[in-house]
């Protein structure tokens, strides 16, 4: 078996890792990714994992809630361990102080050097995939994804840390980080697939232009040179005082050909509205409506996964998690991923060509 997934609920990280180690037995992973409820952070899950698997490359993130096969979890740790049959090699780097327009160039250069140069990566391009985990409090994912994309053609997907209590963190090789991004570049043995599904469609055909925004602080002030709240309420046909009730069900979308990239409002702030992803001035957007998450996710998985994969990692937006909870659809959603060896977590944003949200971004290891 090339990949094993395990879920553990324990009193602390020592107990959780002990149970994980027991469950995988003599399996020898070269790479472990884990999503740990933030309640475990005080007992240092990354440190304990590294002590128990000293030769293994390890990354992880705090989480609000976790997925494991066909189960939805809270206060748990979801682990995925991959051995040499699925992952030929891994290089991990950490970019710190990402809220200060951090330089991603050294990280990408180190990755290229580790794998024998960028030309060598390009010669085996279908084997390489990147995972990126951003620490959420920095609110610097837009800049980070832009700089990663400027420096390499390797696709990086992933998510932003979340939490239920305490501090949001990301983990790499035994250490925990705030205000940082963890990049893991995997050279797979049999390749990979990636899918993105957002269960959204265009609500209004009217294209709107962002005419005043503060990208750094993720605040939008004007659409088509008018107050954003006024325009949003007008298109939805609702009272301006009630627009916050529609932020999740009617997010914004940036359209690229037939693909939608979602940006969701957060809260009204003065004359503007904050977002979970910044949108620069001049961007053309549409107002969307959320559709059938179960139907759309099943279709996306079925269209992409034609053979039984070794493992599946689901970076699922917390808003999607809350939506399926509100609609009593948790089990039907989990059953879609229970067909595979899989883990996932509820993210504070997803990484796919940029920073997005209200999306499920899925990595499939063949």
Image: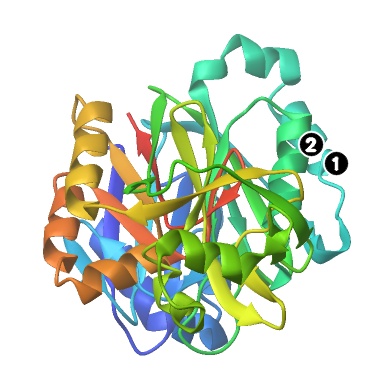
| Residue visible at 18% across and 59% down in the picture | 334
Question: Mark 2 Cα within 10 Å, few/some/many (few <14, many 20+)?
Answer: some
Q: Are marks 1 and 2 in contact (CB under 8 Å)?
A: yes
Residue at image position (18%, 52%) is 294
Residue under the point 72% across and 78% down = 271
Front residue of 172 and 192: 192
**As drawn, 188 above or below 83:** above
Which residue does the numbered mark 2 point to in the structure image? 110
Circle 1 Cα neighbour tier, 10 Å, few/some/many (<14 / 14–19 / ≥20): few
Q: Is residue 90 above or below residue 322?
A: above
Q: Position of residue 125 (x, y in %)?
A: 57, 17
Q: CA distance from mark 1 to mark 2?
A: 6 Å
**Depth check, front residue: 262 or 179:** 262
Q: Where residue 140 sits in the image (x, y, percent)?
A: 73, 60
Foreground of the two, 165 or 311? 165
Label ID, residue 97: none
Q: Which secondary structure lies at badge 2?
A: helix
Q: Is residue 67 above or below residue 95?
A: below
The answer, for residue 35, to whether it is visible in the render is yes
**Quadrant where the image shows the N terminus:** top left
- Residue 354: image location, x then y, percent: 62, 44
Pointer 1 residue: 106
Question: Which one is closest to the eye, mark 1 or mark 2?
Answer: 1
Q: Quadrant of residue 301?
A: top left
Q: Is residue 163 left or right of residue 11?
A: right
Could you tell whether 60 is left or right of 148 in the image? left
């Amino acid at each position: 078996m090339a990949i094993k997934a395990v879920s553990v609920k324990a009193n602390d990280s020592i107990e959780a890792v002990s149970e994980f180690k027991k469950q995988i037995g003599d399996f020898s992973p070269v790479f472990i990714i884990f999503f740990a409820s933030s309640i475990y952070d005080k007992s240092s899950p990354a440190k304990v994992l590294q002590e128990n698997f000293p030769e293994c490359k390890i990354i992880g993130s705090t989480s609000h809630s976790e997925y494991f096969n066909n189960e939805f979890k809270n206060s748990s740790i979801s682990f995925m361990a991959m051995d040499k049959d699925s992952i030929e090699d891994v290089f991990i780097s950490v970019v710190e102080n990402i809220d200060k327009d951090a330089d991603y160039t050294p990280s990408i250069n180190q990755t290229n050097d580790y794998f024998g140069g960028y030309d060598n990566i390009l010669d085996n391009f279908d084997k390489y995939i990147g995972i990126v985990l951003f620490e959420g409090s920095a609110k610097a994912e837009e800049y980070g994804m832009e700089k990663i994309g400027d420096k390499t053609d390797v696709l990086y997907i992933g998510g932003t840390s979340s939490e239920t209590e305490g501090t949001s963190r990301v983990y790499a090789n035994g250490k925990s980080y705030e205000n940082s991004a963890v990049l893991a570049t995997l050279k797979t043995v049999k390749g990979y697939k990636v899918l993105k599904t957002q269960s959204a469609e265009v609500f209004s055909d009217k294209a709107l232009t962002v005419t005043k925004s503060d990208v750094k602080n993720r605040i939008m002030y004007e659409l088509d040179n008018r107050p954003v709240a006024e325009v949003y309420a007008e298109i939805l046909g609702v009272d301006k005082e009630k627009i916050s009730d529609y932020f999740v069900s009617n997010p914004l979308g940036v359209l690229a050909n037939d693909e939608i990239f979602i940006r969701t409002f957060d809260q009204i702030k003065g004359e503007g509205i904050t977002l979970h992803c910044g949108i620069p001035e001049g961007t053309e957007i549409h107002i969307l409506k959320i559709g059938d998450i179960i139907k759309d996710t099943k279709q996306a998985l079925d269209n992409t996964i034609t053979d039984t994969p070794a493992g599946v990692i689901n970076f699922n937006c917390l808003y999607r998690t809350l939506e399926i909870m509100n609609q009593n659809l948790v089990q039907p959603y989990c059953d879609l991923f229970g067909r595979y060896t899989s883990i996932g977590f509820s993210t504070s944003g997803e990484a796919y060509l940029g920073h997005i949200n209200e999306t499920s971004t899925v990595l499939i290891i063949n």
